[in-house]
Structure formats: C-alpha cells, structure tokens
Image (cartoon, rainbow, N blue to C red):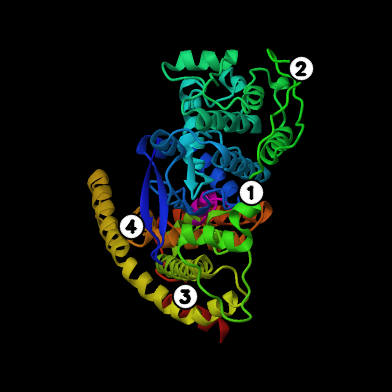
C-alpha cells in the first residue's frame, strides 16, 4: 500500500518517508483516515516508537515522515542468527510491552504488530509502520468486506469480524514473542485460510519455544478472550520470570492444568539498567539521531531533542480554504485588482508563517525545546519576511500568466458560442481565469509552502469549531453576495474599489 524511502532532512539526519501508492492516495476516505491517524500519532512519545516528525496528507502523494531506525527488523535478525534466547528475548518482550503501553496510552492501536514491524536497535525493540498500514487495512475492508492484515498476527475475534481493540495488539505481541523464541510463525505459513483457521482454533505451534515460556505464550494466544491473561498479568509474569521469582502468576488456560508456574531463572537487568539510566538514554538517542549537541550553560531542554511539527495537528482545513476561495472569487467579480491584492497579501503572510514555523521546528529538532526559541524566532522574522516577499513575487509570476491567458481564452470561447465580441474584462471570464490562477498558486511552484502556511494561518484565525463555522459562513456569503451583485451589473467590474470616477463622485458629494 505504500513505499518507504530513506531520506535526509535539511540538517543532514536520516528520516523515513512513507508515501501512499496512487490507488490509495486518490481515495478521499483514505486521506481522512491517514490525517486522523497522523494527528493521533503525534501524541505517542516513546523511544521505543518511531515518532512522526512531519506529514502532508493533502498533497497529490500523501506522505508521513518518521524517525529512521538504523537497525535490522526482528524477522531478519531471527532468520540470520536464529531464535532469541535469555536476555535478548526478555529485552524484546519487555520493550514491546512498554511501547504498547505508550501507544495505547495515546489512544492509538497499531493493528499490525509483527516481526517485520519491529526494529532492533542494539537489542532494544522499536515499533514502526503505524499510519499507512492502518489506512490500507481500513480501505481494503471497505472495498472488499474482508479482514486484511498479516495472517497469524491477527487475533481470533478480529478474524471473525469483531472490532479492532487494544487486545489485537496484545495478541500480535504474544505471537511476535512466540516467533522470536522459536524462529517460526506460531501458526505456520501457507494459504491464508489455513493459517486463519489455526488462529481460530488456537492451534499455536510452540514446540520450538523454551518450555519455561510455553505456558505464558499458550495463555496469551488462547482463542477464548476470557481465558487470556490481561496485559498487567502478563507484565507481572514476565517480571517474575526475568528475576527468577520462586512463584509466579497462576493463569487458568483451556487444555492446561488450572495452575502453573515458571521455573526459576537467573535475574536479568531491568529496562533502566539496560538503558544505563540517563547516559543509556543519551546513547540510544545518539544512535538514532547522531551525537547530541551540547547546550550552553543555563540552557533548558524539555522532552528530548525531537519535537513534532505543529503543522501536522489541527486538521487540513480544506473546507475553510474552499470558503476562502469562494470569497476571493466573489471579490474578483466586482473588484479584480482588489482580489489580486488580497491574493498577494495572503500568499505573503502564508509563506512568512511557513518559514517561521519551519525554522522553529528545525531548531527544536536539532536542540530540543528551549526558552530562547521564541526570542530567536522574533529576531529572525525580518529575514523570513524578506524571503517571503521574494518567493511570493517569483511564485506568482506563472499563475499571473495563466490567469491572463485563461481570461482571453474564455472570452474567445464565449464569443464563439454566442456570436458576440470577446470581452476578457467581464466578470465571468475573470472568475474562470481567477479560479485557474488560484489553483496554479495552490498546486504550482512553491505551492507546498503556501498550503502549509495557509493552514497555519487558518488555525490561528479560527482555532475552534464555532470560529471556523463563522469564518466559512462569512466567506461564502461574501462570495455569493458579490457574485449576485456582479450578475445585476451585467458582469461589468470596477477594476479597483476606489476608481477615479468613484473618488471624484465622493469628492463632489463631500464638498
């Protein structure tokens, strides 16, 4: 459903860019779901999750930019080096537990947890590939009525058509652990219907798993939800197993004795010991992003070096943008030059906002959240304004040529149809040409910056639903009202609201 590219951000650090394929990108429902997923994923902040750094869900090829994890996938590690044992398996299980707790705590369900979506970074797991997999599954479900996913890692209730819940991820977690411990998928390979039937019946093959782990995995993979241990119970059982506790949690499972316990095992380091405290976390961060920059004495950093872009929350504001388009076209029917001035001013402000936000995001990406961010942003604003003016003038040249040319073409076409004289200065050709020019501004050269900046401005102008409804209604009424006025005037515009004739009439009436 998507393609993942390895890329470098402007600071030279590696990121992963996930791009939807065309047959999914053209589906408006897919875009909406992807946008909602991205907005939610920005809340997941955990070193064991590949964080979303930026996204564009409105362009011709929607994409998500995430942290790049420089490590092999779990299935690759197992295929090359064999099953995980001892400390390595325990670090995997406990790391994935912490990651899922962080994901579910943010209200997200991964839906496709499997060995290929787990990257091992120095032995510690990092979960990847949320958003596109989520959207792809939903669209397939809508189109075909089938439950899609990875056979053997979908819970039995989901296979039977029940809603996806957090239990789906915990099932995938247990199946992933079983794979890591044995080196083979717990429900085998082969035709999908065969694998799914084994899932329904609970016929997991755990023969290659250490016998001390079989009872726990057997319980977690039970086809009967009521017989599975809760996540908290599994965590406690794993903790007891890790430290060699004399007795562990008793969990009744169909086909097993009512109680069971893990044999003793030598203790292994806790997660904090594995990471080495703060220094270990710094090492983990440096492995992911390169050496951390040293802060000046007294500088404050909060929440680590990576800050999600504020542009990827708050929705696309497509309806507000369309309402703004209607309002500008309405102005163009009566006062074309005023509409040109409004477009230039909006484009200038949008590009200024985009440059300012981009500078802030990149600064926080490199150095973390600091008290000096806002003062530095204010100090850089004159330079951002100069760049915004220059890029706006350059990027409006082609739309201006398109608008003028389209006005003459539409006038000639109208004259050919009606037998009249071409009148490119009438309201109808001007509106049609203006629409083409505005679309060229939005999708043409420099359009990405205009889109991001416009959404930032609209979120600032109308942060809530009531304010958004008011802005939308105002622009639509303005456009429709001015269009009706232009119809009454037989399509004869005034090129500027304060034309010479109007100014002279106003002067005579005043004196």
- Residue bearing mark 4: 444
Query: Residues at badges 3 and 4 in contact (C-beta under 8 Å)?
Result: no
Mark 3 vs mark 4: in front: 4
Residue 297: x %, y % from top left: 60, 81
Task: Judge from the rendering whether residue 153 lies leftward or rightward of residue 81; answer left or right.
Answer: right
Residue 501: x %, y % from top left: 43, 76
Query: How many C-alpha atoms fall within 10 Å of the one at disc 1: few (<14), some, or many (≥20)?
Result: some
Q: Earlier in the sequence, mark 4 or mark 2?
A: 2
Mark 4: secondary structure: loop
Task: Judge from the rendering whether residue 18 lies leftward or rightward of residue 107; answer left or right.
Answer: left
Mark 4 vs mark 2: in front: 2
Q: Earlier in the sequence, mark 1 or mark 3?
A: 1
Residue located at (61% from left, 70% from top): 301
- Residue bearing mark 2: 258
Q: Earlier in the sequence, mark 1 or mark 4?
A: 1
> Does residue 297 belong to the magenta stretch?
no
| Foreground of the two, 391 or 52 | 52
Q: Which circle marks residue 215 in the picture?
A: none
Magenta stretch secondary structure, dominant: helix
Q: Which residues are magenta?
A: 314-324
Query: How many C-alpha atoms fall within 10 Å of the one at disc 2: few (<14), some, or many (≥20)?
Result: few
- Residue 441 seen in this snapshot: yes
| Foreground of the two, 195 or 33 | 195
């Amino acid at each position: 459903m998507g393609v993942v590219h390895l890329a470098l951000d402007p600071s030279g650090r590696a990121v992963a860019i996930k791009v939807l394929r065309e047959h999914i990108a053209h589906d408006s429902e897919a875009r909406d779901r992807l946008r909602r997923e991205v907005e939610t994923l920005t809340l997941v902040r955990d070193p064991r999750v590949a964080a979303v750094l930026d996204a564009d869900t409105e362009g011709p090829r929607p994409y998500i930019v995430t942290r790049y994890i420089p490590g092999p996938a779990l299935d690759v590690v197992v295929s090359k080096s064999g099953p995980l044992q001892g400390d390595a398996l325990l670090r995997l299980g406990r790391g994935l537990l912490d990651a899922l707790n962080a994901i579910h705590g943010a209200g997200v369900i991964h839906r496709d947890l499997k060995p290929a979506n787990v990257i091992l970074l120095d032995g510690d797991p990092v979960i990847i590939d949320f958003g596109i997999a989520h959207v792809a599954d939903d669209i397939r479900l809508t189109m075909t009525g089938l439950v899609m996913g990875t056979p053997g890692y979908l819970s039995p209730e989901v296979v039977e058509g029940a809603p996806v819940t957090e239990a789906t991820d915990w099932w995938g977690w247990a199946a992933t652990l079983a794979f890591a411990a044995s080196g083979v998928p717990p429900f085998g390979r082969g035709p999908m219907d065969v694998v799914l039937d084994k899932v329904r019946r609970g016929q997991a093959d755990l023969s290659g798993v250490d016998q001390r782990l079989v009872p726990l995995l057997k319980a977690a993979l039970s086809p009967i939800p009521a017989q599975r241990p809760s996540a908290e119970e599994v965590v406690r059982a794993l903790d007891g197993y890790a430290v060699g506790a004399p007795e562990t949690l008793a969990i009744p499972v169909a086909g097993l004795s009512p109680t069971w316990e893990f044999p003793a095992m030598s203790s292994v380091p806790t997660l904090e010991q594995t990471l080495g405290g703060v220094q270990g976390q710094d090492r983990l961060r440096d492995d992911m992003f390169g050496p951390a920059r040293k802060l000046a004495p007294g500088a404050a950093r909060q929440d680590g070096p990576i800050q999600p872009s504020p542009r990827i929350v708050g929705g696309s504001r497509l309806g507000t943008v369309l309402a703004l388009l209607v309002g500008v076209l309405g102005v163009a029917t009566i006062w074309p030059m005023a509409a040109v001035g409004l477009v230039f001013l909006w484009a200038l402000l949008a590009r200024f906002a985009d440059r300012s936000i981009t500078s802030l995001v990149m600064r926080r990406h490199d150095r973390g959240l600091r008290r000096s961010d806002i003062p530095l942003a204010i100090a850089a604003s004159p330079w951002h304004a100069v760049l915004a003016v220059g890029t706006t003038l350059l990027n409006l040249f082609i739309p201006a040529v398109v608008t003028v040319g389209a006005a003459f073409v539409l006038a000639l076409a109208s004259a050919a149809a009606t037998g009249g004289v071409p009148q490119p200065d009438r309201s109808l050709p001007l509106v049609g040409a203006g629409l083409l020019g505005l679309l060229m501004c939005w999708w043409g050269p420099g359009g990405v910056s205009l889109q991001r900046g416009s959404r930032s401005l609209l979120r600032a102008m109308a942060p809530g639903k009531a304010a958004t409804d008011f802005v939308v209604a105002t622009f639509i009424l303005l456009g429709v009202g001015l269009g009706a006025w232009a119809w009454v005037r037989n399509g004869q515009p005034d090129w500027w609201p304060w034309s010479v004739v109007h100014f002279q009439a106003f002067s005579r009436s005043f004196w």
